[in-house]
Amino acid sequence: MYSIDFERDRPYLTWESIRYGIEQGLLAPESAQTYASKISESAPDTVDACIVELLIAEPDDILTALRQITAKPQFEQSGAARALRAVLLFDACEAATSNRELLLQTEEIYADFENPADMDGLIYYLPSTDPDWDVTQHSEEENERHLAEKIRAFSTAEIHWLHSRLQ
């Protein structure tokens, strides 16, 4: 399971992306309570009865309470997986201590999100999709650095998409 830095990532997350993450086994159910807690601290005027119910829910009831929140008409499911993936990839870019570590974390996210086609060119064991980069002409270290740069650029673009979606 992934952990999220709610202080940094909360503006990019939605109830739908939290729900998607829990339903897919990517996030612990308690992450919904942490998200609700951060919202209640920063925007107490947005807390309603459903959020309070989530905050006090027993572990086995968290997903049920979260489904009540996302069942409201103003919530949409489209983009929830992409939003969560963007946040997790951004966190991986921030946390990676080496290019190799970033490649491995990206591969894990790729697999956990059922191999999204837009990430195919970022996976080290798949054929390169970069017509301007011949992997046979570069060392393993150069190839890893190049791929890590592509991952960071992709992550930045996804965060920009997410940010524009939330405005």
Image: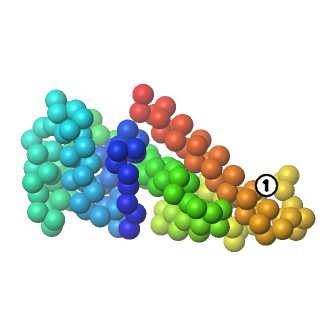
- 87 vs 96, nearest the viewer: 96
Residue at 85% from the left image edge and 52% from the top image edge? 132
Q: Is residue 129 visible?
A: yes
Of the residues shown, which amino acid type is indicated by label 1? Answer: Asp
Q: Quadrant of residue 62?
A: bottom left
x%, y% of residue 150? 69, 52
- 143 vs 96, nearest the viewer: 96
- 17 vs 58, nearest the viewer: 58
Q: Alpha-carbon neighbours of circle 1 within 10 Å: few (<14), some, or many (≥20)?
A: few
Instruction: Tell me the residue that label 1 is attached to.
Output: 130
Residue 151 appears left or right of 28: right
Q: Quadrant of residue 52?
A: top left
Q: Quadrant of the C terminus?
A: top left
x%, y% of residue 11? 38, 38
Q: Quadrant of residue 143?
A: bottom right
Extreme residue in the right direction? 137
Residue 107 appears left or right of 135: left
Q: How many marks?
A: 1
x%, y% of residue 112? 48, 66
Residue at 15% from the left image edge and 37% from the top image edge? 47
- At mark 1, the secondary structure is loop
Please, is residue 71 above or below residue 3 in the view? above
Please, is residue 101 above or below residue 70 in the view? below
Residue 65 appears left or right of 104: left
